Amino acid sequence: MPSTHAIRQRRLAARRARILAAARTLFARHGVEGATMRRLADKVGCSAPVLYSHFADKADLLRQLCAEDAADLLLAMRRAARADEPLARLRGMARAYIEHALRRPAQFQLMFLTPFPPEELRRISAGRTKDDPALACYAILRESVRAALERRALPRRPGGPDALAQALWGAAHGVVALHAILGASPDVPWRPSRAVARELVDAALAGWSAREPRRARTKARRA
Amino acid sequence: MPSTHAIRQRRLAARRARILAAARTLFARHGVEGATMRRLADKVGCSAPVLYSHFADKADLLRQLCAEDAADLLLAMRRAARADEPLARLRGMARAYIEHALRRPAQFQLMFLTPFPPEELRRISAGRTKDDPALACYAILRESVRAALERRALPRRPGGPDALAQALWGAAHGVVALHAILGASPDVPWRPSRAVARELVDAALAGWSAREPRRARTKARRA
DNA sequence: TAGGATTCCTAACACTGTTAGCCCCCGAAC
DNA sequence: GTTCGGGGGCTAACAGTGTTAGGAATCCTA
């Protein structure tokens, strides 16, 4: 038989989860701006101040949502990272990113399209632990690039693995970001963003790998 | 001797220009959100409602600023488009975009990082003439891609010139956009964005052109 | 059942973009 | 020079926003 204290705790946790769920659909439907604290409170069935007993402020609530989605992205990237062939692995990770962006536009906007003031970013960083999902996403990408360099599937470039990791990230990011911002503009004859984004990632990887002997050859040389 | 009417008109035009100039520095310093209409009015030296006699609303003011900066970007892209060699031309245009983004971060944020609601985008589109600088930027990029396809410097891909143009745009956009959004985050060991962005553009162009005979060879074949 | 703590709501504050209404001042006509 | 007209610009207010203070109601404990 749980103590009343525990029961209360659980009730609070349940409501906290309900808030996050409601916030997610609200952000998805009305965007970050349109999802106001009062509307969120209405949807949850309480008053606005209650939200502040669960989250420090609106930015904090957004951060929690981001963290949840970063965990999802991390899962997808971990799955992609299981591929053996270094280039396939990188391609898979980029595609996971693209897929994530297209399937969760609101979360993508929150994580990668919303400019936070630098001070805020530093605060977020201060609250991060070493196994933060967002950090782990970059770490796993960087590690895969490093492995590709090691196995000579990519050429060494000035800037080391970070430069290539960030370039690859940019490749996956660029097209879907453009589409997310300007995709509704009828003045550009937009092509399907998934295909275009993949096209760019493939071209970049092909461009890099063309400057260096293929992995197969390297292997043969080693053998 | 100008009529009093004309004098008034000129005074109004002058203030309109002053408002735009003040808005530009204000947006650059405090971001889109932090630049409020009242602060802008203070800086100009009038009250907030006066701004509404020059611009329909805040979004309208932003659009005017965007248009000015789009004209700048168009100039840079026109300059880059003078290159003869198709790939150099595309590379130059991508670099012009990158340079523009890095030199005018606030304007870049306005034009390519700020999500407008779709309805707003459609309104903007409705107000555009055929020689709108933003449209012209895309048109010139697309035309350069088309020329590169024509001269077999790029391979034909499903999606036509639009797909490739958008992919190239994404390549130039991706890295600088990421940097603009997350560049202040201390958790990622950022490499200089200019170099990384160029690296990506070069790799993508190399990747595409590697799949097709080089321009020189094509020329030789023709001859 | 009385006490005490906790939880939650109403009301308010400091902002935001935006608009209504009034006043004043400048230019023009007599 | 005086008076009139009208447009420009101001103050004040409205409907929102995120956020907080204070009191009421509720529920568990003694």
Image (cartoon, coloured by chain):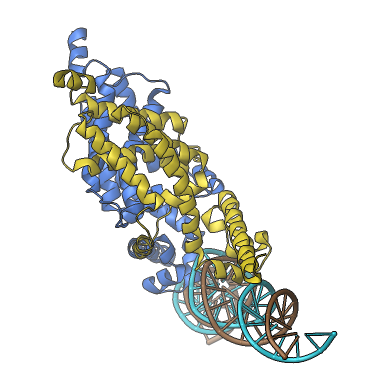
Chain colours: A blue, B yellow, C brown, D cyan
The quadrant where residue A159 appears: top left
* Image quadrant where one finds the N terminus of chain A: bottom left
Relative to B212, A67 lies left or right = right
Label tally: 0
The quadrant where residue B158 appears: top left
**What is the x, y in percent for residue D13?**
60, 83
**Residue closest to the eye, A2 or A138:** A138
- Whether residue A20 is visible, yes or no, is no
**Residue closest to the eye, A92 or C28:** C28
**What is the x, y in percent for residue A156?**
35, 18
Q: Is residue B159 above or below residue D1?
A: above
Q: Is residue B19 above or below residue B218?
A: below
Q: Is residue C10 above or below residue A219?
A: below
Relative to A214, A57 lies left or right = right
**What is the x, y in percent for residue B72?**
47, 44
Q: Is residue A165 above or below residue D26?
A: above
* Image quadrant where one finds the C terminus of chain A: top left
**Residue closest to the eye, B195 or A219:** B195
Relative to A34, C30 lies left or right = right
Residue occupying image coordinates x 33% and y 40%: B169
Residue occupying image coordinates x 56% and y 70%: B53
**What is the x, y in percent for residue A171?**
32, 37
Residue occupying image coordinates x 21% and y 8%: A222
**Residue closest to the eye, A163 or B29:** B29
- Whether residue B58 is visible, yes or no, is yes
